[in-house]
Image (cartoon, helix red, strand yellow):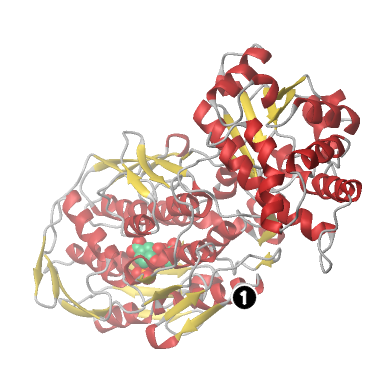
Amino acid sequence: MRNNMQNNMQKDMMVNDTYEVKRLCNRGPFCVKVPGSKSITNRALMLAAMSERRCELTGVLFSDDSRAFLDCLGRLGFELIIDEENERVVIQGTGGVIPNNTASVDVRSAGTAARFLTVMLALAGGDYEMNSSKQMAKRPMEPLLKILRDGGVEFEFLGEEGHFPFIMHSHDIHLSSVTVDTTVSSQFTSALLMAGTLLDAGLDINVTGSRTEGSYIKMTLSMLEQFGISYTRHDSGYRVAGHQSYGLGSYVVEPDISAASYFYSMAPILGCDVRVERVHRPSLQGDMKYVETLGTLGCVLEESKEGLWVKGSGVSSYHGITIDMNDFSDQTMTMAAVAVYADTPTSIYNVGHIRYQESDRMAAIINELTGMGIKCEEIPQYDGIRIFPGKPQPVEVETYEDHRIAMAMSLTGLGADGVVIKNPGCCRKTFENYFEVLDSLYTKADVDVILLDNDNTIMDFDECARRAVAISLEKAGIHAGKADTAVGFADRFLVHNTSMWQKLERREITRQELLDTRWQLFFEKEGIDYDGKAFEAIYRDELTKQHVLYEGALELLKYLSERYDVYIATNGITRTQTRRIAESGVGKYIKGCFISEQIGADKPSEKYFDACMNGIGIYDRSRVMIIGDSLTSDMKGGVQYGIKTCWLNRAGAVRPQGLHCDYVVKCYEDIERIL
Ligand SMILES: O=C(O)C1=C[C@@H](OP(=O)(O)O)[C@@H](O)[C@H](O)C1
Ligand SMILES: C=C(OP(=O)(O)O)C(=O)O
């Protein structure tokens, strides 16, 4: 599979597959839909199953983690209606009684299912075989199992002691007060909080460790409240009363903000605006803190009825930050990818626990970014990591069967060429169509007419000018200084010339003034005694004969002309441009040519673009796109006029502040990709 993953593709076949991330030229705005929250879905399933009501869940996640949970509930005998198409599940709560109290279940790779169901089944009682994926079998369970063992639950380990898989016998549980450490996983605490009410006398939960007030514990507490389960706080934790009668008729699951974060991160990376459907503040999800952090990189967060926008279109570049991500550590890898495109290093700290998740995420980030040529180091004293800005090299990225490594690392490929994600199918854990949603951003532009800049877009003006200067110097009998070459002289002239054309674009001088004075002013700077106007005439004559095209320019013109009405839109002198266009072979691919001298106005002026539109006979500005290298004439003009804009940024220059182009391309192949 290279882009365009098929929905119905056999997921198991994807393990050895790869996804090549293409540079994304589109600059949005992007509106995407992400699946329901994994954490909320699996909590809601558990709370609804133990409730006394029939509950309809909507906005439900359908992905491996929630399917695992649903499969387990099915095997345990719960009555379920699974309506995947409408992201809906109806579950009949059984008031804390497990219908099949002897069953074999498989939590697969879902940390939530592993921890929540183990406690739920232990506290409800019965004999259960608990299976998992190999990955989950390596993840920590023992702190939770020890609490249960101390309460009388018996475990037979089928693999490594203290880990999945195991058989659990729970018949005479005697737990009233437990102490749980959150350091390696806060899910232990969440599990006890949700299941506590299954015990006759309820449960006192003393919480210790580094994340006692963590965002996922807060999510659990909020959801207990939503479902009508009461709890009280005490100095060292919580108390959940026994056998509460509770239930909800319906529950709406929020979209997954962890999933949304990959798309929101494109806002600073690409300088675009991104909206994720149905994401709103406030949210139950702690990863909203990550989204808010994008505000510190210069993005603007804006609520809308359809969903939260993260607007990066005003962001030209951003600095790295130093940030404690302990409470939204699932986004550590995402932040690391964003850090690659910052202009100073980023330090993320207090995230030691990510070593015990789907993979050793700390090691994974360091290995994979280093492999891409990005400097990245561990900061052991702060349980953190420092990432330096860089340009990702085209390499294959290992994903360690970890969905978040795959999704985060795909972001590194958006601004570079050829980053390849191995085993993209691992995203099935929480976001099985992630790469399809990513693919959907690579849309073609919907236009009919192309205005194509000439110089430095299809013709190598600098090379033309260098040649014209050399011949003109010869003809005028000027020697450009002893230690100098005509090329060095021409290059200095080009800098001077560009600044004069920019003055013309800003209307500080007229075209005639430019032509009359540019050589005189330059000769004065160079200490050359020669009549500038006379030299202008020689140079102009020579320039008219120069038409060096960039490699691939004619092929591009052919490609575009077969699909669109193509016009040349140039600031220049009629005689010069007409001849160059005719002699270069460009003429046969275009419908016409708009030359500023002929029009009597230059790009970026409205008058210039009015003349183009009149000449083409088109009134709908959204059907027209200008492609050019110049921000000050092509892009500024196009943006102001309201036509589509495509910036040819060959050198990878920093994007301009406050000037948002619709597309940013690096080469002609990119243009063919968007048109
Ligand atoms: O409770 C939850 O839903 C989760 C808690 C966090 O795990 P840990 O508490 O194990 O770090 C988080 O990383 C995971 O994605 C979901
Ligand atoms: C740690 C994660 O998952 P789990 O719920 O399996 O712990 C995660 O999704 O990043």
Residue at image location 63% in from the left, 28% down from the top: 625
Q: Quadrant of residue 321?
A: bottom left
The three-letter code of the residue at mark 1 reads Thr
Q: Residue at x 23, y 57 (%)?
A: 96
Q: Mark 1, residues whose alpha carbon is within 10 Å: few (<14), some, or many (≥20)?
A: some
Residue 499 locus on image (x, y percent): 61, 47
Looking at the image, residue 590 sits to the left or right of residue 178; the answer is right
* Residue 444 can be seen in this image: no
Q: Is residue 478 above or below residue 122?
A: above
Nearest the eye: 647 or 257: 647
Q: Which residue is mark 1?
A: 370
Seen in the picture, residue 604 relative to 195 is either above or below; the reply is above
Q: Relative to 632, is 349 on the left or the right? A: left
Q: Quadrant of ligand 1?
A: bottom left
Q: Which residue is pictured at 46% across the width and 64% down the height? A: 335
* Residue at 40% over, 82% down: 383
Q: Residue 653, image x and y in percent?
A: 61, 54
**Could you say which quadrant of the image residue 601 lies in?**
top right
